[in-house]
Amino acid sequence: MNSFFNNTKDAFTLKSNFDLLRARFLFTIIQNKFLVRLGTWVTNFCLKIHLPINSIIKISIYKHFCGGIKETECYPIIKNMFKKNVCTVLDFSTEGYQNEKDFEICCEKKISIIEFIKDKDEIPFAVFKPSSVGKSSVFEKVSKGTILNTDEKEAWLKIRNRFHLICKKAKESDVKILIDAEEFLIQNAIDQLALEMMIEYNKNEIFIYNTVQMYRKDRLTYLKKITTENPGILLGFKLVRGAYMEKERYLSKKHDYPSPICKDKLSTDKNFDSAIEYVFQNLKQINLVCASHNEASTLKVMDLMNKNNLKNNDKKVWFGQLYGMSDNITFNLAMKSYNTFKILPFGPVKNLIPYLLRRAEENTSVIGQSGRELSLIKSEIRRRRLQS
Ligand SMILES: Cc1cc2nc3c(=O)[nH]c(=O)nc-3n(C[C@H](O)[C@H](O)[C@H](O)COP(=O)(O)OP(=O)(O)OC[C@H]3O[C@@H](n4cnc5c(N)ncnc54)[C@H](O)[C@@H]3O)c2cc1C
C-alpha cells in the first residue's frame, strides 16, 4: 500500500472504538464467500416470510454503510465529515421502483433532495439512477433502436421529461448531478439522455455528469467519440470500473451476445487508466469524478493533476468513494485539500437491502477489497490500543 493511504488515524478519525469493532466483525464475515451466500439466502428468506429482521440489519450492516431513514437523520454524519473536508452525496434508495406511480414519486423525491441540499456546501452533488425514473424495458428498447408502440412512446416521453425536471432543478439550485450507469442493455438510452442533458444544462459550467463504466470494452471509444463529436459542449464524466460484471456475463451468455466486459481485471484497469489519461488531455472540455476505491487509480489522478498544474482543490476534479469503504483514501485525500465526497445511501432499511447485499457480494468477489478494509481497520484498532 502506498504510504499516502497508510494513515489510519485520520482515515478513521470519525469512527468510535465501537464502530471499528463492528466494522471488523462485518468485514470478517464479508470476506467469507460461504457466509455471504448463506447470509443473503437467510435475509431473502426472512423477508419473504415477513420475519422482523429490519432492526438487526439496521444496527449492523446498515449502520456501517448507510446514513439513516431520512435525509435529516443523515445530517450529523454529513456535518462531521465536512469538518474533515469530506463532502457528501445523498443517495435515496430507489431499488424496486417499477410502475409509473413509483417513478413519479421517485422523481419528486430527487427534486426534493435537490431542494434540501441547495445552498449546502457540504453536499455539492445530487445523484440519480435512470431506471428509478422509468421502466427498464423502455430504456432497453430505445437502446436497441426498436420501434416503440404508443404506450412505450408515452413512457419514454415521461422518462425524458423526468430527466429534464431533475437536471433543470439541479442547475437552478447550483447543484451538480451525477447520472448513474447501469446494465449494458439499457445504457445506450441513458447515454442519449445524458448527452441531451449536458447539451441543455452544461452551458457555462458543468452541472451534468454521465457515468462511464471502464470494465466495458467499448467505453474508451465512447468517451473519445462523445468528446470529439461535441467539441463545443462541456462534458462531465464520472469514471467507474463497473458494478454489474457478474450479471453482464450471465446475461450475455443467456441471450447469446458477446460479453461487453473486459476479459480480465488487468484489462479493466488498463482501460480505466487510459480513460483518466484521455480526460486529462481534454481538461478544457471535461470535468472528472474519479469514483473508485482503487489506490493506484487515485494516485494516477493525483499525479496527473500535479503534472497539469492543477491545484489539489481545483473543482475540475473530484474523488468519490462509498460511505463505509476506503476511508483511508477519502480522508487522506481530504487532508491534502483534494475535493472528495462520500456517497451516503439513505432510506428505509427494506429498500436498502439489495444495496447492502451488493456491497457484501462485491467485497467478497473483488480480490483483496475486504482484505484491504479489514487490515486497515485492524491496524487502527491496534494503534488505539497501544496508545491507551
Ligand atoms: C462514488 C462511486 C460511484 C459509483 N457509481 C457507479 C455507477 O453509477 N455504476 C456502476 O456500475 N458502478 C458504480 N460504482 C461502483 C464501481 O463501478 C465499482 O464496482 C467499485 O467502485 C469497485 O471498483 P474500484 O475502482 O473501486 O476498485 P477495484 O477493486 O480496483 O476494482 C474492482 C472492479 O474491477 C472490475 N473487475 C474485477 N474483476 C474483473 C475481471 N475479472 N474482469 C474484468 N473486470 C473486473 C469490476 O468492475 C470490479 O467492480 C461506483 C463506485 C463509487 C465509489
Image: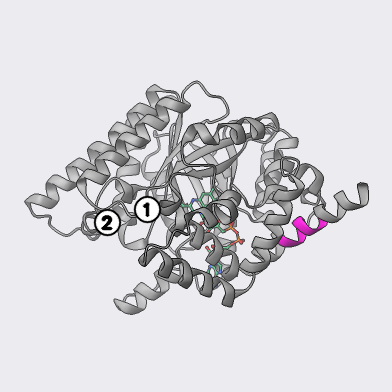
Residue found 81% across the figure and 45% down from its top: 9
Which residues lie in the magenta part?
374-379
On screen, residue 190 above or below 341 = below
- Which residue is found at the position 69% from the left and 62% from the top? 25
Q: Name the residue tied to disc 1.
A: 95
Quadrant of the picture in which ligand 1 is shown = bottom right
Where residue 372 sits, quadrant-wise, is bottom right
Q: Residue 265 location, x and y as percent?
A: 58, 69
Color style of the picture: one colour
Q: Is residue 258 visible?
A: no
Q: Earlier in the sequence, mark 2 or mark 1?
A: 1
Mark 2–mark 1 distance (CA, rounded to whole Å): 12 Å
Q: Residues within 10 Å of mark 1 (few under 14, many from 20)?
A: some
Look at the image and tell me whether residue 47 can be seen: yes
| Viewer-nearest residue: 245 or 46 | 46
Left or right: 21 in relation to 58 = right
Q: Tell whether label 1 touches label 2 (CB within 8 Å).
A: no
Tell me the residue that label 2 is attached to: 136
Q: Nearer the viewer, residue 245 or 212?
A: 245
Q: Residues within 10 Å of mark 2 (few under 14, many from 20)?
A: some
Choose between 39 and 269: the one closer to the eye.
Answer: 39
Q: Main secondary structure of the magenta part?
A: helix
* Residue type for callout 2: Ser
For the point 35% across and 74% down, the residue is: 252
Q: Residue at x 81, y 54 (%)?
A: 381
Q: How many tags in the picture?
A: 2
